[in-house]
C-alpha cells in the first residue's frame, strides 16, 4: 500500500515538474497599431459618408433624420483618435488596443453604411475620394 502511495506521489510531482517547464503563453497578438494614415483615412471615410448621405437627404426627405444622426459618427471617431494621440496621457498596450478597436469599429460602421446607400439615389462623388491605396 505504501509503495502505491509513493508511486502516485512521484507521478504527481513528476507531472507538476513537467508542466512547470512549459514556456509562458506568448503575449496577446492583435492587429498592428493604427498608423496616422489609417486614422486620417478612417476619419475621411466617415466624413465622406456623412457628406454623401446629407447630399442625398436634400433630394430625399426620408434620409433627413439619418443625415442628422450620421453627424455623430465622425465626432465619435475623433474621441478615440484623440486618445491615441495622447490627449488623456500615455496609453498602455491594452488600452491602446481597446481604443484602436473602438476606432476601427466606428470606421467599419461608416464604410458599411456608405456601401448600403442606394447608388441610384446617392451616387458616389469622384472629387474628394481617391481610389489609390
Image (cartoon, rainbow, N blue to C red):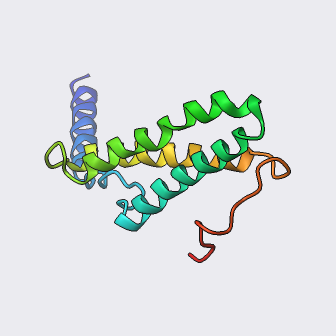
Which of the two residues, 58 or 122, is positioned nearer the viewer here?
A: 58
Whether residue 133 is visible here, answered yes or no, is yes
Which of the two residues, 64 or 111, is positioned nearer the viewer here?
A: 64
Q: In this view, does 33 lie to the left or right of 21?
A: right
Whether residue 18 is visible here, answered yes or no, is no
Q: Is residue 13 above or below residue 125?
A: above
Q: Which residue is drawn at 25% across and 52% down?
A: 24
Numbered marks: total: 0
Q: Is residue 20 above or below residue 44?
A: above
Classify the position of the N terminus by image quarter.
Answer: top left
Quarter of the image for residue 23 reads: bottom left
Q: Which residue lies furthest to the bottom in this view?
A: 132
Quarter of the image for residue 66 reads: top right
Q: Which residue is drawn at 86% across and 51% down?
A: 120
Q: Residue furthest left?
A: 89
Which of the two residues, 32 or 81, is positioned nearer the viewer here?
A: 81
Q: Residue furthest front?
A: 58
Question: Measured from the top left, where is residue 72 in percent x and y?
Answer: 48, 35
Q: Is residue 104 left or right of residue 51?
A: left
Q: Which residue is drawn at 28% across and 48% down?
A: 82
Classify the position of the C terminus by image quarter.
Answer: bottom right
Question: Measured from the top left, where is residue 42 in percent x and y?
Answer: 48, 56
Which of the two residues, 92 or 27, is positioned nearer the viewer here?
A: 92
Q: Which residue lies furthest to the right in this view?
A: 120
Q: Is residue 50 left or right of residue 124?
A: left
Q: In this view, does 75 lie above or below 123?
A: above
Q: Is residue 89 above or below residue 60?
A: below
Question: Measured from the top left, where is residue 79 in percent x and y?
Answer: 33, 41
Question: Measured from the top left, where is residue 3 in percent x and y?
Answer: 23, 30
Amino acid at each position: 500500500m505504501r509503495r502505491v502511495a509513493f508511486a502516485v506521489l512521484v507521478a504527481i510531482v513528476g507531472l507538476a515538474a513537467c508542466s512547470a517547464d512549459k514556456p509562458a503563453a506568448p503575449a496577446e497578438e492583435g492587429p498592428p497599431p493604427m498608423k496616422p494614415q489609417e486614422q486620417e483615412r478612417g476619419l475621411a471615410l466617415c466624413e465622406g459618408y456623412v457628406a454623401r448621405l446629407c447630399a442625398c437627404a436634400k433630394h430625399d426627405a426620408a434620409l433627413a433624420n439619418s443625415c442628422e444622426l450620421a453627424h455623430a459618427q465622425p465626432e465619435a471617431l475623433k474621441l478615440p483618435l484623440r486618445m491615441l494621440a495622447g490627449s488623456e496621457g500615455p496609453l498602455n498596450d491594452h488600452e491602446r488596443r481597446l481604443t484602436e478597436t473602438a476606432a476601427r469599429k466606428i470606421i467599419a460602421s461608416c464604410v458599411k453604411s456608405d456601401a448600403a446607400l442606394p447608388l441610384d439615389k446617392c451616387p458616389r462623388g469622384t472629387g474628394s475620394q481617391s481610389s489609390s491605396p
